[in-house]
Amino acid sequence: MTNTTEFFRTLQQGVLVNLNTAMPCKVLAYDEEKRMAKIEPLFMIKETGEEPAKLSPIENVPVLFQKYRVNGSEPQNYEPFIEPTDTVLVVFCQRAIDEAMKGNIIYPGTARMFDIHDAVIVGVF
């Protein structure tokens, strides 16, 4: 294998290892009124030559709710029931979600992509 091929394989692996898409997390605390949780990622990280390490807890993670219309009735919101110690599935948005959560269109000028702080809880395992 050439040095160039090895370089690009290493680069690709480094990019993929640091790309956050989805992971299971444990709920540490949940504010039902605000629908925000504090979570602990259940995956560890490992740098070459280092011991595996836990990821830090993530604060203020929004929890999705569902909106349904049943048999032609008025739409109703169904809020999740989440408790500390529940294991949830968390997705990480492609871009920063701060403004999107307010319904604003976002200019993708931010360098924040697939960041662990743009987590959203989508369900309970």
Image (spheres, rainbow, N blue to C red):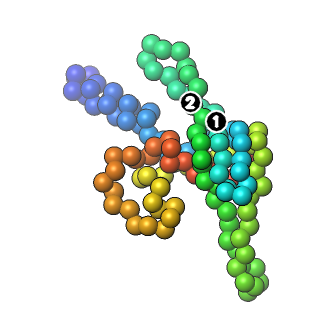
Q: Nearer the viewer, residue 110 or 1?
A: 110
Helix, strand or loop under label 1? strand
Q: Residue at x 21, y 27 (%)?
A: 4
Label 1 with label 2: CB-CB less than 8 Å: yes
Percent x, y of residue 39: 64, 40
- Figure check: 81 above or below 26: below
Residue 3, quarter of the rendered image:
top left
Q: Nearer the viewer, residue 7 or 57?
A: 57
Q: Residue at x 47, y 55 (%)?
A: 98
Residue placed under numbered mark 2 in the picture: 55
**Dot 1 or dot 2, earlier in sequence:** 1
Percent x, y of residue 116: 50, 41
Q: Amino acid at mark 1?
A: Glu
Can residue 13 be seen here? The reply is yes
Relative placement, left or right, of 63 versus 72 is left
Q: Amino acid at mark 2?
A: Leu
Q: Residue furthest bottom?
A: 72
Q: Residue at x 74, y 67 (%)?
A: 78
Q: Check residue 40 in the rendering and tell me which mark sits there, or answer none.
A: 1
**Cα distance between the residues tagged 1 and 2:** 7 Å
Q: Nearer the viewer, residue 11 or 18?
A: 18
Residue 109, quarter of the rendered image:
bottom left
